[in-house]
Amino acid sequence: MTEEIGGDGAAGRPKPGTQSVDRAIAVLRSFEGAARQTPTEVAHRLGLSVSTAHRIVRALHDTGMLGRDALTERYFLGPTTAILGRLALERMGATLLQPELSALRDGTGEAVSLGVRAGDEVAVLLHLPSAHPLRYDQPPGARNPIHGCAMGKALLAFEDGAAALREPFRRYTPATLTTRAELEADLARVRERGFSLNEEECLAGVRAVAAPVRDGSGRVFAAVALQGPSVRFGADRMPDLAEAVLAAAGRLTELHRHLPGS
């Protein structure tokens, strides 16, 4: 079995001094998709040798990053991970911003998400579900392709990260933008009007509208989105939803300016 985690893009060889760190991060991230795992399951999921997975899992357990169920011998994200995650949310202002997200959800009746860039993906920090039976849910920690979701395009429009994406971009639906030219044209529209749209580009039957949130220095650090089934996100309603998202993003930006250290 080959172990390519931590390899460079050109030759697949490990980068000097980073392989152990890359593998430890990969092991932690593997728990995003599986709540409890044995080291052997981690090894199979990541393409590591069983001995390597055991060694990394034990080291992470020793620091409290992973916990262990003595009965099943399965590991799970531990107390240290929970504490760091909570601190990160607080210091990014996510918990302070939640009342505004709740107001947006209650005012529109639609699901609301707050997300940040994580490489070529958007990681969901907070999600407030809609009360409608027919709705789109994504729990905190969920990741979306940055070129295929409204939050991703709201983030890309105000930074230079789009140039780093490799073509062709992965296609998820017939509406997905797969070339840099298509994406750049869409990002130009986002900059012009201030909000982005997801027209069933990631998941058929789901649309979204998003706007950027800025920190105290004016840098776009997050995006807020309304998401839901296409039947409720038609052309007749989209202007009102976009206006609501823009107003919420403005209030979130203003709140973030008053955070300590902003």
Image (cartoon, helix red, strand yellow):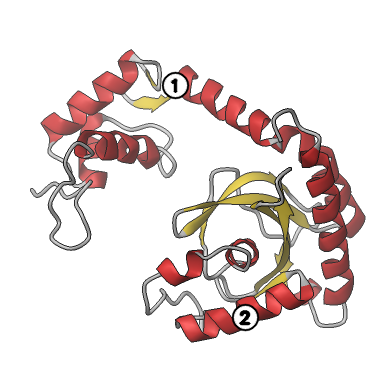
Identified at 15% across, 47% down, the residue is 14
Q: Residue at 87%, 67% (x, y): give it.
A: 243
Q: Residue at x 18, y 24 (%)?
A: 55
Q: CA distance from mark 1 to mark 2?
A: 41 Å
User: SS at mark 1?
Assistant: loop
Give the vertical position of 262 relative to 1 (above or below).
above
Q: Is residue 135 above or below residue 36?
A: below
Q: Position of residue 32 (x, y in %)?
A: 44, 41
Q: Residue at x 81, y 61 (%)?
A: 245
Of the two numbered discs 1 and 2 in the rendering, the one whose residue sits closer to the viewer? 2
Give 16 or 222, whichever is nearer the viewer: 16
Question: x%, y% of residue 81?
Answer: 47, 25
How many marks are shown on the rendered structure?
A: 2
Give the camera-side residue of 44 and 18. 18
**In the image: residue 124, left or right of residue 61:** right
Image vertical order of residue 68 relative to residue 128, above or below? above
Q: Quadrant of residue 95?
A: top right
| Residue 78 numbered tag | 1
Kind of residue indicated by mark 2 = Asp
x and y percentages locating residue 187 in the rendered image? 62, 76
C-beta proximity under 8 Å, tags 1 and 2:
no
Q: Within the image, what quadrant is residue 23 found in?
A: top left
Q: Which residue is mark 2?
A: 186
Q: Is residue 149 left or right of residue 217?
A: left
Q: Quadrant of the C terminus?
A: top right
Query: In this orientation, does residue 4 appear?
Result: yes
Where does residue 260 sit, x and y in percent of width and height? 74, 28
Q: Is residue 71 visible?
A: no
Badge 2 crowding class, 10 Å Cα cut-off, few under 14, some 14 to 19, many 20 or more, is: some
